[in-house]
Image: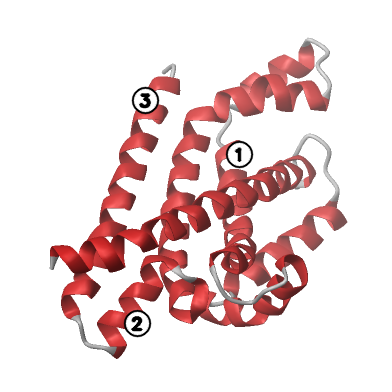
Amino acid sequence: MMEKFMTIVVPSIPDTLYMVFFSSLFSMVLGIPLALILTVTRPGGLNPKAKTYQVLDTIINTLRSFPFVILIMVVYPLSTLIVGRSIGPTAAIVPLTVAAAPFVARIMEGVFLEIDDGLIEAARAMGSTNKQIIRKVILPESLPAMINAMTMTIINIIGYSAMAGMLGGGGLGEVATRYGHYRNELDVLWMSVLCIILIVQIVQWVGNRLTMKTNKK
């Protein structure tokens, strides 16, 4: 069993970490600005713009409603266009990002809306612009909740990466499917599952520590 673990399971771990890291990074880069736009343009926001909010809200809700397995099949042609291939860990980053970015946008919007209105009104009373309110009030005050939301996102992406592996994305999901399902090597299947669980536990522990350190309350 140890030989299988070292020769089959261990080599697939870097692929999973690679997919999760870059998918998480890109989804944050896309999702957080979208969340800020939603927060600012929503009715009652810093700069209400009904049409902008409605368009973004509809797009995000539409993407979030796609089952991930279907979304992978729909987006894989985009992977070929962007990275030149439709299988492997690099190709899987594209659908993982497309799936996670709307989730990030929606969950971060909720985080930003939790900011005490009194803080925003106080900043306005001191003559702060909308950009200054975002930079000096909304983002700093939201930091612990943002880290918690990022942790949830990364854990979701770990689960998504396992499903992507079933469709040629590589990583632990592919190992579990190829050996555990098709070859009925249940020991390899459970070793892959345990590795995924361990990665999730580490991410959650790190996220909890960072949330506690940044929480001033």
Image vertical order of residue 10 relative to residue 186, above or below: above
Mark 2 closeness class: few <14, some 14–19, many ≥20 residues within 10 Å: some
Helix or strand or loop: what does disc 1 sit on?
A: helix
**In the rendering, at what x and y percent does residue 131 appear?**
80, 26
Residue of label 3: 212
Looking at the image, tell me whether mark 1 or mark 3 is earlier in sequence order.
1
Q: Looking at the image, tell me whether mark 2 or mark 3 is earlier in sequence order.
A: 2
Mark 1 or mark 2: name the one nearer the start of the chain.
1
Task: Please name the amino acid that badge 2 sits on.
Answer: Arg
Q: Is residue 27 above or below residue 81?
A: above
- Amino acid tagged 3: Met
What residue is drawn where x is 40% and y is 75%? 174
Amino acid type at image mark 1: Leu
Q: Which quarter shows the N terminus?
A: bottom left
Residue topped by disc 2: 178
Q: Is residue 201 above or below residue 11?
A: above
| C-alpha span from label 1 to label 2 | 44 Å
Numbered mark located on residue 113 in the image: 1
Q: Nearer the viewer, mark 1 or mark 2?
A: 2
